[in-house]
Image (cartoon, rainbow, N blue to C red):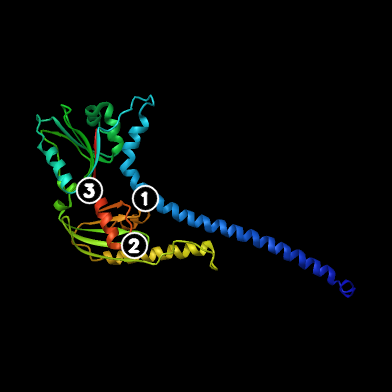
Amino acid sequence: MLDRLLGREELKARIDELEEENRHLQRQLDAESERRAEAVTARQDAEERINRLEDEIAGLEGRLGADSTEGNGNGDGVSPRRREELRGDRIAAVLDRIESVRTDREGALSAVVDGAVPDPVTDLAGERAGLVSRTAPCLYYGDDAGAVSVALVPPLPPEEFVEWGDRFRVDRSWFDPAVVGAHALALVRADTFALGRFEGRERVEVEGFESDVKSDHSKGGFSQGRFERLRDEQIEAHVERCHEALADVDDVPLFVVGDRALLAAFADRAAVTRAVDATGDPEAALGDATRSFWTTRLVAV
């Protein structure tokens, strides 16, 4: 009765209503936070998967393109005669064969295809020119007798050219670290850095480090937004540390590989950048990255 007389019953009822509303809102907030946390983790997983898949796509695009056209009625149902990943002694042997070809004065066509397929390549490859387009950017070698018709995707592609001659234009520095000579190759991932100095195919020096970059979001007292900002700051600090480690590499060509999203930060410094998939500690990851970078893809058209 005293509560009723003093108006406390209404206040208590209102407090109960507000507390229930607060509990309801807190449940909504918890559910939303959980969804956002799951979204952050999913996004990170997706980014890592994208990096891996984009690397694989580069090697499979020509095959998938050819397979997808078979039997579809568009007149382009052709498949490569052969595909192969070349490195080391194997690429040297293949280049030996290409260089050994001799023809009449304008019987051998050499071309860099990056974008639209040049008319001479289309004329020579005929209905199989689509394979060249799907392999691009690439080098194409073909002769007027049809004995040679092959596309190569080299580690260090040259500027575009199209030329006829009595032999194919081959520069082994496009393909082989042994010919390139002294160079440096750096691997940059969101939390890993490795730098190797090479004399041809031989690695003579390696250094690297790993940075503490958060990879999973948990509630832990801070929001998704704060987590993302902290992670971005950690990655920026890692990239800056990578730049510092590369400061002394100015005496040899530098090739930078790794996460596609980070490569733009090194485009001004590197002679070539390329996305590759490499895992493990810095030294092991550098080994994977080196093998991937110095691999030439062959597609027999």
Question: Which numbered disc, 1 or 3, marks the residue that appears first in the sequence?
Answer: 1
**In the drawing, does residue 74 fall left or right of residue 171?**
right
Question: Which numbered disc, 2 or 1, marks the residue that appears first in the sequence?
Answer: 1
Query: Regarding mark 1 in the picture, which secondary structure is present there?
Result: helix
> Residue 192, labelled with which disc?
2
Q: Dividing the picture into quarters, in which one does residue 161 lie? A: top left
Identify the residue at horizontal 32%, vertical 44% (top origin).
Answer: 58
Instruction: Mark 3 and mark 2 in contact? Answer it, CB < 8 Å.
Output: no
Q: Tell me the kind of residue under disc 2.
A: Thr
Q: Tell me the kind of residue under disc 3.
A: Leu
**In the drawing, does residue 267 fall left or right of residue 72?**
left
Residue corresponding to mark 1 = 52
- The foreground one among 299 and 103 is 299
Identify the residue at horizontal 37%, vertical 66% (top origin).
Answer: 211
Residue 249, horizontal then vertical, whole percent: 22, 63
Residue 263, horizontal then vertical, whole percent: 33, 55
Q: Tell me the kind of residue under disc 1.
A: Arg
